[in-house]
Amino acid sequence: MAAKLILSMDGVVLKEYPLSKERMTIGRKAHNDIVIDNLAVSGEHAAIVTIQNDSFLEDLDSTNGLEVNGVPTKKHFLQNNDLVEIGKYKLKYINDQAGQVNPADFEKTMVLRAPVKQAASSAEKGDATMGLMKTQIIPNVKPAAEAIEKTGKFDVPQPNPPVAPPAVQPAVAVSAPQAAVIQILTGPNAGKELELVKNLTTLGKPGVQVAVLTRRPHGYFITHVEGASHPMVNGMSLGDQPHQLNDHDVIELAGVKMEFYFKG
Amino acid sequence: MKIEDALEIVSQTNPGMVRSHNEDSIAQELACGLVVLADGMGGYNAGEVASGIAVSVVATEVCQHLQDASPTDRDEASGEELGVALLRDNIQRANASIFHAAQSQPQYAGMGTTIVAGLFYDNRVVVGHVGDSRMYRLRGETLETITRDHSLLQEQIDGGMISVEDARVSKNKNLVTRAVGIDAEVVPEIHVHDALAGDIYLLCSDGLNDMVEDEDIQSTLYAMQGNLPLAAEQLIQMANDNGGRDNISVMLVKVNGEFAAPRGWLAKLLNWLKK
């Protein structure tokens, strides 16, 4: 399903516009794809360029400008649920394609290129006999860079791709575990705290003696990387396997003791 | 130093958390300094077939050719250095093999693959690639991408349509503009880079770089440079921890010393006598 814009004013939905064309314009004049007949709206106020699954909003030097999520904007890469405001009118951008596709279809690499005729015909045959094909060839789509070169702008007439590619989800932020801290107990740096804010924290010096603390969705792990002596946790020497850390574990590395604990 | 002693190669491939099978293929040939990685596309097992053909054609042909020739020789046909010509010619040969298999077998119709290959010799690395499989280089503390994806997204970035930050949330991540085996002809992108002692080269399929930020790749390679097998394992684990939505392949090549090609007729003669 294509992305769409929902036009509303004062909380009342006026109309839905599927983003079915490569370039759609918003303005007061009748020739626009989305007509908003209001004096605060310029003749040609803004344009939305859609390339495959991504849409870009561009202000066409309008008199009163536009805002996206409350911020005045000239050009914006639209994300699902963005709210575009033109005067009193609101346009909500909906692109929830990722939610409607079988998860197994995600991340499938596809070729964006017109194939030679022979390949196209056999690919079609293949499609018919095989049902699902992971590789999809999308003819008639010009590479974007080429399109930009030609016009210096977005407005390239481009037929819609006949084969809609399966949508892909942007990488989801994986929930991080509870915040944790390492406090150094002995040696010249005793008392210092190190908050484990990165996915990977290095203890020691590469090339000499290194252990790393890794933050994973289900907790923190310490792993010996290199060096003559392996780190100890609560007095036990670690092997080569990662070791999960518990609250108040005491780590000893090259003679320095430190405590691991969860924060808050 | 002989190339076997100068390079350390570690590789791992993993189906990820979502896919039931692995369409990536990898090959390493330490004796001739070659690493090859391919990420296949196509229905049923056609993706594996395509990436498998690509990797085996390039690995076998390049190494066989180098048994009785030096990569620093001139290639008669193109006038280029043999190492460069071999990589280009054999990616094209792989392209022809896949294309013909796809033409003749209906179940393989439309299959294709990305490829990235590195041929190390004479303190250099020749890098050839098609599609969005990448090669990174860690030098000192700096991680750089030394291939440029053949993808719609990269073209949008190059054209200034979309910023690198915005590209991370793009929904057009997996559209490649060049692939091996889709067409009768393919143009591989070939570059030559100097390889320095201490460098670490990472070849990966997009299952890694789509799931793991470059910053995390950098910190892993830097912290774990003394333990390559652990570094490879850690990279795959991070991709899987973040969802592992695609197959993940990782190849690491660490340059431990210089590997200059033998120079002059005497060195060549000695080298020849050693065979």
Image (cartoon, helix red, strand yellow):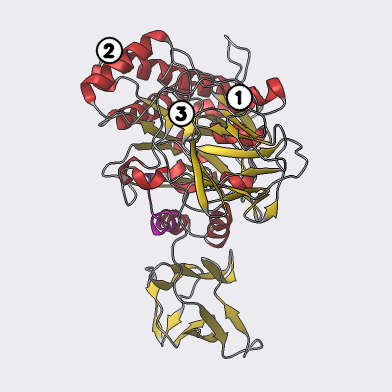
For numbered disc 1, what is the local secondary structure? loop
Q: What chain is tagged by disc 3?
A: B
For this view, does A26 lie left or right of residue A227? right
Residue A247 in the image: x percent, y percent?
A: 42, 85
Comparing marks 1 and 2, which lies closer to the viewer?
2
Name the residue type under label 1: Thr
Name the residue type under label 2: Ser
Mark 3 vs 2, N-terminal side: 2
Residue receiving disc 3: B275
Residue located at (66% from left, 56% from top): A70
Mark 1 vs 2, N-terminal side: 1
Residue receiving disc 1: B72
The answer to whether residue A14 of the structure is visible from this angle is yes
Comparing marks 3 and 2, which lies closer to the viewer?
2
B45 to B80, vertically: above or below: below
Residue A173 in the image: x percent, y percent?
A: 47, 59
Residue located at (40% from left, 45% from top): A98
Magenta highlight on residue B241: yes
Residue receiving disc 2: B104
Mark 3 vs 1, N-terminal side: 1
Q: Give, as a single range, the part of the protein colored magenta.
A: B235-247
Q: What chain is tagged by disc 2?
A: B
For this view, does B39 lie left or right of residue A60? left
Q: Is B108 in front, or is A241?
A: B108
B234 to A41, vertically: above or below: below
